[in-house]
Image (spheres, rainbow, N blue to C red):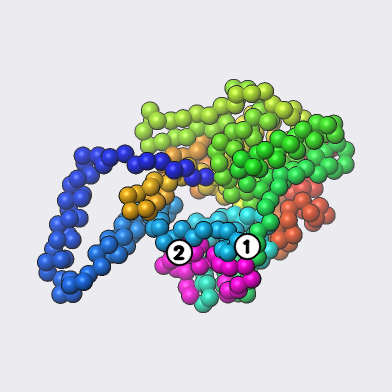
Amino acid sequence: GAEASRSPPPAPATYAAFSQFASFLDAILKNYSNSTNLPLHVHTTAALRAFVRSLDPDAELIAPADNIPVDETHIDFGAVLALREGQPTIVSVRDGTTAQLAGLLPGERLAAINDEPTTAARLSEIQRQLTGTPGSKFLLRVIDPATGPRQMLIERRGATPARSAIKFLANGIGYCRLAEFTPTATDQLILAIERAKAERTRHLILDLRNNPGGSLDAVIIAAQLFLPAQTKVTTLAYARADRQATFVTSTEPRFTGSLAVLVNSGTAAEAEVFAAALRAGKRARVIGEQTAGRGRHIQLFPLPDGSLLSLPVAYYETPGGRRFHDTGLTPDVVVEVHRDIERKLASTGYGQNAEADLALQRALELLK
């Protein structure tokens, strides 16, 4: 998830660095053979982007031109990306999007878009290339570490909004897909819980596979539906110890039946916070594959020129005090799924094909 925050005035210690950079620019302008009509702002932005990229793979300087409006004229591709070993890699794929319909999976690396290599591209630049008008097509070459490279011609399609709807299975078991943590999804989850109680549902399966996270506030509200009041959900561990912030539930739970939480390698960030909190509170067993390990809180800092600095500012810690960034969460019950089966489940929608869904079957067995 990301929040906007105002940047404080520069600290005194930073002025030495500003002075060095100013001397560097002055030497170029006075001595460079092509200094006439030099587009200084372009090169300064490029230098700052390189600085940010060298600082942290999850940090980025987003220029105003990088922000493409996602509306009826521009379709969000639906893949959440991160740089891993310098390669743009899929973290999660959102439900109902072009990326999901194309059968893309977490862990696949984007090698080229329209035969243009992505190696040196920034993530915002790649997202801009993936975004386009409905019905437009592009070539995408991906490399799956498990099955190798493949090339696809992809048509951009309008996204179908994901819903936290509940389905009722046998033996008093409910199934609820949690595709993302947003205020809307949380409201839908509350309605699903009320339906579950009306149907006398005793057990509930919460499906967090390919959930990329979202709003921390939404996670706290969702966790309160299942955890007792004053239960720790997570701690934000900032660089300064005196800035640590611990979040606890403030209301009694609305659902007290047994829970199973389904996860996979696309369960990321705030979704990992939610799964870890329910497990630490002894409310749920976590079933599936190792999670993504996206355990840092990202903030957006507006800059005077309209740019945004996206920066990891704190680590998420589980209620037990463990950080899971880069390592992920290990499920209580590990269920390995072949990539071809995973691709089929993801492209058709989780919860739609119970016979092929080994993690869902395992959850049903445990809850019975």
The structure residue drawn at horizontal position 74% and vertical position 59%, both measured from the top left corner, is: 348
Magenta stretch: includes residue 136: yes
Kind of residue at disc 2: Glu
Disc ID at residue 60: none
Vertical comparison of 147 with 282: above or below? below
The structure residue drawn at horizontal position 62% and vertical position 56%, both measured from the top left corner, is: 93
User: 171 left or right of 83?
Assistant: right
The structure residue drawn at horizontal position 18% and vertical position 47%, both measured from the top left corner, is: 16
Vertical comparison of 287 with 279: above or below? below
Kind of residue at disc 1: Ala
User: Which image quarter: residue 164?
Assistant: top right
Q: Is residue 211 visible?
A: yes
Question: Mark 1 highlights which residue?
Answer: 99
Q: Position of residue 134 (x, y in %)?
A: 62, 67
Question: Mark 2 highlights which residue?
Answer: 125
Q: Position of residue 126 (x, y in %)?
A: 48, 65
Vertical comparison of 287 with 23: above or below? above
Badge 1 or badge 2: first in the primary sequence? 1
Magenta stretch: includes residue 291: no
User: Which image quarter: residue 41?
Assistant: bottom left
The structure residue drawn at horizontal position 41% and vertical position 41%, both measured from the top left corner, is: 5
Q: Nearer the viewer, residue 299 or 136?
A: 136
**In the rendered structure, which segment of residues is drawn in magenta?**
116-140
Which quadrant holds the C terminus? top right
Q: Nearer the viewer, residue 261 or 6?
A: 6
